[in-house]
Amino acid sequence: MTDLDETCVNTLRFLAVDMVEQAKSGHPGLPLGAAPMAYVLWDRHLRHNPADPTWPNRDRFVLSAGHGSALLYALLHTTGYDLPMDELHRFRQWGSRTPGHPEHGHTPGVEATTGPLGQGFAMGVGLAIAERHLRSTLNREGFALVDHYTYGLVSDGDLMEGIASEAASLAGMLGLGRLIYLYDDNHISLEGPTEWAFTEDVGARFAAYGWQVLRVTDGNDLAAIDAAIRAARAETARPSLICVRTHIGFGSPVQDTREAHGEPLGPGNTRLTKEKLGWPVEPAFLVPEDAAAHLRLALGRGAAEQAEWDSMRVRFSASDPSAAAAATIQLSGEYPANWAAALPTFHAADGAMATRDASQKALAALTPILPGLVGGAADLSPSTKTVLPKVPDYSASVGAGRNFHFGVREHAMVSMLNGMALHGGLLPYGGTFLVFSDYARGAIRLAALQQTHVVFVFTHDSIGMGEDGPTHQPVEQLVSLRAIPGLTVLRPADANETSAAWALAVRRRGPTALILTRQKLPILEAAIRPAEEGAARGGYVLADPSNGTPEVVLIATGSEVALALDAQARLAAQGLRTRVVSLPSWEIFEEQTSEYRASVLPPGLPKISIEAGRTIGWERYVGPTGASIGLDKFGASAPGPVVQREMGFTVDHVLEVVQRVRAPRNVGPTP
Amino acid sequence: MTDLDETCVNTLRFLAVDMVEQAKSGHPGLPLGAAPMAYVLWDRHLRHNPADPTWPNRDRFVLSAGHGSALLYALLHTTGYDLPMDELHRFRQWGSRTPGHPEHGHTPGVEATTGPLGQGFAMGVGLAIAERHLRSTLNREGFALVDHYTYGLVSDGDLMEGIASEAASLAGMLGLGRLIYLYDDNHISLEGPTEWAFTEDVGARFAAYGWQVLRVTDGNDLAAIDAAIRAARAETARPSLICVRTHIGFGSPVQDTREAHGEPLGPGNTRLTKEKLGWPVEPAFLVPEDAAAHLRLALGRGAAEQAEWDSMRVRFSASDPSAAAAATIQLSGEYPANWAAALPTFHAADGAMATRDASQKALAALTPILPGLVGGAADLSPSTKTVLPKVPDYSASVGAGRNFHFGVREHAMVSMLNGMALHGGLLPYGGTFLVFSDYARGAIRLAALQQTHVVFVFTHDSIGMGEDGPTHQPVEQLVSLRAIPGLTVLRPADANETSAAWALAVRRRGPTALILTRQKLPILEAAIRPAEEGAARGGYVLADPSNGTPEVVLIATGSEVALALDAQARLAAQGLRTRVVSLPSWEIFEEQTSEYRASVLPPGLPKISIEAGRTIGWERYVGPTGASIGLDKFGASAPGPVVQREMGFTVDHVLEVVQRVRAPRNVGPTP
């Protein structure tokens, strides 16, 4: 290590330590141990332009061990990102750009929101998948529009999480040679030594997944780290894991102990650490001039690299204008004009159709129009109906493939979708049974928090799926997904609402969950609406009584809308004028004006919701004089229509509840 | 294979095939391929007594690949469990004991509810953990009260799931030599060949975890399977994975294709399969007499084994009455009398205390009284405060340990807790941050579905946890957990309610989630209640106005109760008489009489809920004239009190909302 290198490494170390000290909160241990590898990577390998964090062809760096955020902020600040020193002083404070864990969209240069362990690992795999796909599809001979690496820094905690195992297995299978992870192997986790909980042979495990495994025995040996990264870059057919033996809290009195992990060193130990590593005790937040100058060379390098890329792009446009233009559109996240017109419309004459099948038809229609549309399912595509027709599978040998076999790996699937979306240029979707969205919930939450543009196709959406029984029948998932801020949940009532739901999912810029049936549903001609009406408003009047203003309102979603219509007909025969409201999305309905909402759900009328899931939250729509027909227990194994009948999803039961609601004394939720 | 063996294997195969045919639904592929290994295991190794499925020392068998349920039902029926042929005919029908996936508590002999992949794998690890712990603590020289194996049948889908990776890593570290898994390695998953999604070297991966890996190259070779199981049993220091190369849908025209996985063969292919394997086409559900007689030998063997065990227990009681009696109590799931009296009571003079700290004190108090109380955290015990004092860690060398280091493996942790509870004899608990309950949701759901008696300690329960930011601050988790049928969620308001919550968690026989703060909360003397009052009723009047009947009700949970009390005081100064209701558990409150509930929440009064989470569902308590103070967006990184203040958890804001609610025109939920 040269003196300058050492100064740079210690600059990063002590910026991080001083941030944590100032905040009296944070994680100094990782920065002290991992600063050398981060420095080598950022100084000698990472191609990026701190002046333009949106440069499409930058290398991606993901700090999967997000608790080491102070190290990332030190890197971003010193290499010239728009993260001034003042922000480092305000680490973990209200309104700062330096939150406790890195937040994408909040801080320039943060590629992914991390902290929940394993997520960064899997998102990095998604980034590398996206890079290889775009490299395989957008580039032309001599014009390497997309051509970069994905790097990550991962911790033992990341590698313990199942999501990382899932993603690692897939990354190995897919041969993602541009994916390089530095493993901060410091032998300490929050509770204590990793020998208490993590004694497996990590290298052998990753070799079993098909990764190249490299080792650096001294985490302070910059040359060895550099050589390992070079070896990783030289391996084009396999992802690489570089196991770097480090010491948590390096140089501090609490080195190699759990105390270094998640608490400030305190003034005394900070002083001792600086003294031990030959660093001035004062001032805090020191960036020596030589280190500052050296680290900021990234700006010049980045500008030159991006300029070269820009000029290549000009030549590309001249050489192959249509390919270049299409690539620009795709990378920018725009769509060809009139894409929505391709979505199918269905008619009653087409016969009943499961919404999963309608979704398959919508996907098929979008396939040729949206080249960035890619996805698959967690080993359920024949059931979730999520195959893009006439395009190849993505595999180790076919980077241009658009259909993914994610395997039975729901959690990694969603996290990888997040990574693919974060890359830019792709609109990824992923499917599984609604009940197994539970497995992916950690990643769904990060989709919502980061507002990644991804589409979840969750099928087999109720007890109506039948024989597979309560382990496979969702009950609480609808309300649980609606509870996630920033996630749009859409449960279409028929094939036409499914088409509209896909239009919304493509148009909206955050995550959307489509909730679809296994069983067939009638096609509702009344659901065919212009693009800005009907399902597009989240909820709407699907059918009003023919003979005057309604006396009661039935609100339903998905498969229960047809039941509401049947009930409406029976009630009409009994002389009761009933409105049926289809309410596929709470979130979109809440975005409408209060006037519109009141026009759909008139305050004065008794209302009954019908949905084959828990009733929690429906109170907001049915109000004090209404009732909710739902499921407040688990389902059971039997043919779908039998389960529905036995659990109260019958016209007779709806009529009973209508009667009860109209008898003014007996109000409240219905079990 | 002898003729009789072959007859027995084919009996199992075709019972399963015929069940699926009769139901026109199910999975014939696994039973056709895996029947030989299941037969060898059940016929030659499994120690069980079909006449008494509750025999504590039976070997446990978990069908992790729960979609192969028909095979398990065929085994249970033919070996003499109370599962008559009529039930096989009613496979997957309403009210039958043969649901689509195995359901513990529903069908005798089903040790765990499986189907969601990976769960059975991890529950099996929990069963083996429990066996070793009880073997290490309850047995005495010459008296092997607990001394059995745990077997499982796992599929490629199980092994792809992250939860299985987590559990496998721990099982290897813990050296669970009595854990033996047969891997039905059939090269086919639902979408197609496993080479599309699962090309890793499974054996090398498991060796890296510390497992013994054995191979059987022909899944029909009973002798080889038998030899492998013997080798697995002979290895006492490591769990064993036996990779058995099988053929999905063996013998059928769709053998080795995905079509064999999840659809009935159909009458034509059923006939062809029977012909191919030399089985009578008619009658269906054939159990030849020689096979019936042979398979039912399990009854006699089991009765003899259990009788031997019973007589050993008698000798044990004579030799060491107190140890034997204590073991009997523990294995039966009973507690010593007066256990609840040990729980601490706190007083204001003790100073403010985080509920996580109060929980730690409750755990400490219970440690010496409840020997079956075991648990730990997902690498967060210093934060979740979930350490049992003065008892050892559970490790490869200390089976008697009661403190577990689960590592950063939330999902496997909860699933292993389920397995430990299913074993009997233990009351397991596990801790993590509330936000990371998301990672474990698949297993939490199975806890609720099976009603395993487990306790979740979810701390850092709101934005009040502060600087770690939105990735670590729960917002939607409370309502998401409340949405799971059969799960009791308890969010105590202070240390005394925390003591009461632990009493409830121990007393109730299903899963309970304790939702606890990181930050200190004042001790509320008013929360000290007799064991059957207060928190024990789910919700109660904590503080009424001193000067007459209340005019408004503030309902709060957890840390927001203290805020409600502060608001009550300020409102009193303004002349408004306010009631404060603490409502730690919706589920328990709903169990109370409607009279009691109305006495706590009088229908006529305006009500406001205060809880630092999403407001969905609070409508049921605040009613049409009330309002909810909550969080309908993600949190932010800053010191806890700052985040709480900025997000509206202030007395001023509560007062504003009270005013708004009392102005009759402006009602509805508050953002």
Image (cartoon, coloured by chain):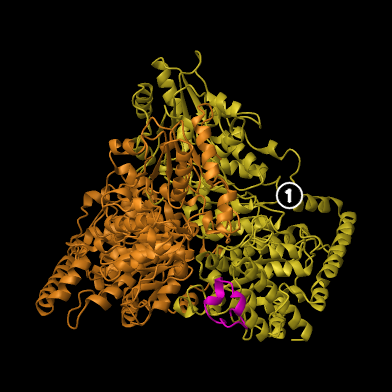
Chain colours: A yellow, B orange
- Disc 1 marks which residue? A333
Instruction: Describe residue B18's horizontal placement relative to residue A485 as left or right.
Output: left
Residue range highlighted in magenta: A248-268
Name the spot of residue A165 as percent of width and height, x first.
53, 68
Which residue lies at the image location 51% right of the left edge and 67% below the top edge? A161
Instruction: Describe residue A554's horizontal placement relative to residue A590 as left or right.
Output: left
Total tally of numbered discs in the picture: 1
Name the spot of residue A125 as percent of width and height, x first.
63, 64
Name the spot of residue B191 as percent of width and height, x first.
51, 56
Residue B155 appears in the figure? no
Which residue lies at the image location 51% right of the left edge and 80% below the top edge? A201
Whether the magenta-drawn stretch holds residue A262 is answered as yes
Q: Amino acid at mark 1?
A: Gly
Give the secondary structure at mark 1: loop
Which residue lies at the image location 31% right of the left edge and 79% below the top edge? B233
Query: Between B217 and B51, which is closer to the camera in this rendering?
Result: B51
Magenta portion: prevailing SS class:
loop
Above or below A119: residue B282: above
